[in-house]
Amino acid sequence: MIIIPYDMLSYDDEVIYHILLHELVHYGEQHLLFQWAFWLVKAIYWFNPIVWIAHEWMKMDAEYACDDEVLHILGQEQDSNYGHNLIELSAHQGKGSYAIHASGLVNNGKELRKRIERIGNGKKKWRILEMVTVLILIVMIPLFFTVEGEAIANRTWSVRKALTGKTIISDRFSLEPSTYSYDSKTGEFIITMDYDVDQAFYDEVFYNSYVLSFGLTFPQSYNKDVRENSGFDAVVLSEAVKASEPLTLKFKIDDYNIEAYGEPVLIFLGYEIGYNFQQDQQMTVDIRTEALPIEIIVDEQLTLEVVQAEATDEKKYTIGYKYQLKAPIEFEKEKLSYMSLSEEFSLYDQEGNLIPTQESSGGSSDDFSTRHIWVENPQLVDKVTMTIRGYRISKDNVYLWGHSNYQTSDISYSWTLPIETKDVTYE
């Protein structure tokens, strides 16, 4: 519950929102704790002018930092509105308005002018002053403060609410979050997703391995650390299809609460698919140097073109091939899909005898792969057979994979999960 002065009710909704957001950022950054620490230092070292100066620096830097975080949350389009509201509020100073002083958004005229100039110039906060402040605290007094956050009640809640409808991931299947819950005892944010697949895709998923990756982020949070750190989980779609169960995602989120974190945003990060051919699906292709290039149509998604088959060292035979891959799930911004082939090569001499091999290694770049086979005398090789047992595809939602902050990325598939008090059910 938030208590505000009565005369603040006459302000515009935007002004009240800016005031509350400003104070929430102070709370999230724990500026009040630093203020208390400095008051204690001043009480002990009241005779030292450096401590008094550092305290003033720290208070001003806290306001700068708070302005920066508020503007980051509001976005560039609202920079001028925020600065305008600062000016409007400052006009009421000294006129008996308790709300102005209680809000903490406006300080004296000189400091306010500096803050508005910084907003207009887009300057960042003075981290040097923060470091000086911390240094003085460490040097002046060897005190250790242990702050224990307010414990969240050990309760489990869930939300069952239809969202905007199913999201079409491809012409073959769709996804839709159905329920989500949080257990404060385990720190798990659990999301259940329904899916629809057509019959052809069902058979494909049933007999192969489909792994889907998701991220959970909180872009509305006033806490920078919360905004810049996201949860991750991967689920096996194949197992869910076989068990006729929905997808269940579990994200480790400690001490989640709607006030500090805001509404979660679920993001589809990418997938990895493993196609394992049955014995009767495996293919064997004869490769001879004089017949290159050789095109191999593995299936409707993968086509190979063998362009190299030759001795490249005294004891090494190299096979190189290009591949063209049609990803089963595409994203709005195209990014190369990665493929790894499960293959086996056998080498034969002119009489058709199998040539013993020692070991092999390989590598790939972009859409080209090579396989190096160590053999006692590669010059004897006359024919190579290539047996394909399967392959794996991995594809990332462009600009997302490997990053903890997804806010500034181009996101193809995401879902905002609304959490309202009337929709919450406690267990």
Image (cartoon, rainbow, N blue to C red):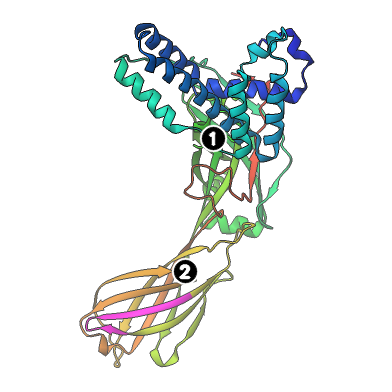
Residue 80 placement (x, y as % from top left)? 70, 35
Q: Main secondary structure of the magenta part?
A: strand
- Magenta span includes 148: no
Q: Closest to the observer: 91 or 216?
A: 91
Q: Amino acid at mark 1?
A: Arg
Q: Is residue 145 left or right of residue 167?
A: left
Q: Which residue is mark 2?
A: 366
Residue 28 placement (x, y as % from top left)? 53, 23
Q: Closest to the observer: 334 or 313?
A: 334
Q: Quarter-wise, where is residue 222 in the image? A: top right
> Which mark identifies residue 139?
none
Location of the C terminus (image quadrant): top right
Location of the N terminus (image quadrant): top right
Kindly identify the residue that appears in the image at 53 percent across and 29 percent down. Answer: 65
* Residue situated furthest left in the rendering: 376
Establish if 242 lies above or below 187. Answer: below
Q: Is residue 295 left or right of residue 314?
A: right
Q: Amino acid at mark 2?
A: Asp
Residue 51 placement (x, y as % from top left)? 39, 16
Depth-wise, is mark 2 or mark 1 nearer the camera? 1
Q: Is residue 90 left or right of residue 137?
A: right
Q: Which residue is mark 1?
A: 227
Residue stretch in magenta: 311-322
Q: Label 2 crowding class (10 Å Cα cut-off): few <14, some 14-19, many 20+?
A: few
Q: Closest to the observer: 254 or 82?
A: 82
Q: Is residue 349 visible?
A: yes
